[in-house]
Amino acid sequence: MPAFGSRRAEQFGVVLLDTKHRVLRTVVVAIGTLNSTVVQPRDVFREAALGAAAAIVVFHNHPSGDPSPSPDDVELTRRLMAAGTLLGIDVVDHIILGDVRYWSFKETEKR
């Protein structure tokens, strides 16, 4: 959260993971405006493929400070999960960062 949570514009990034889910590197794939970022699965998975990632965690921030997912966030997560399944790159989680809180799709799914 300190590195990406309190930005004035939305940033969307991907954490590339190896087969044991160790971090290979983190890449910001899109920088948007105050309340939106255009992200395509091809941009996310291009980075994952070039980085030889076995799995990824995607993240973005909400400059408003409220990490609650929007309907667009939910739809993007669904698309990324489907693309990851097709490509054989596991999408471990999508995390939305706020000022002092975060939203994890994986943690919410367990409830």
Image (spheres, rainbow, N blue to C red):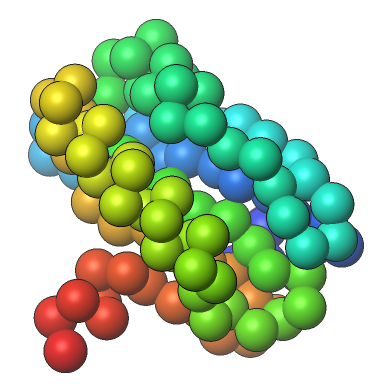
Depth order, front residue of 5/66: 66
Measured along the vertical axis of the image, is residue 24 above or below residue 38? above
The location of residue 84, given as percent across then percent down, is 23, 33
| Quarter holding residue 63 | bottom right
The location of residue 9, given as percent across then percent down, is 83, 56
The location of residue 67, given as percent across then percent down, is 57, 78
**Which residue is painted at 41% across and 63% down in the image?**
74
Marks counted in the figure total 0
Measured along the vertical axis of the image, is residue 48 above or below residue 110? above
Would residue 76 be visible to someone looking at this image? yes
**Which residue is painted at 44% across and 21% down in the image?**
42
> The C terminus lies in which quarter of the figure?
bottom left
Would residue 55 be visible to someone looking at this image? no
> The N terminus lies in which quarter of the figure?
bottom right
**Which residue is painted at 33% across and 14% down in the image?**
49
| Quarter holding residue 85 | top left
8 horizontally vs 59: left or right:
right
| View extreme (top): residue | 50
1 horizontally vs 32: left or right:
left
57 horizontally vs 11: left or right:
left
Measured along the vertical axis of the image, is residue 15 above or below residue 41? below
**Which residue is painted at 37% across and 33% down in the image?**
16
The location of residue 58, given as percent across then percent down, is 43, 48
Measured along the vertical axis of the image, is residue 25 above or below residue 12? above
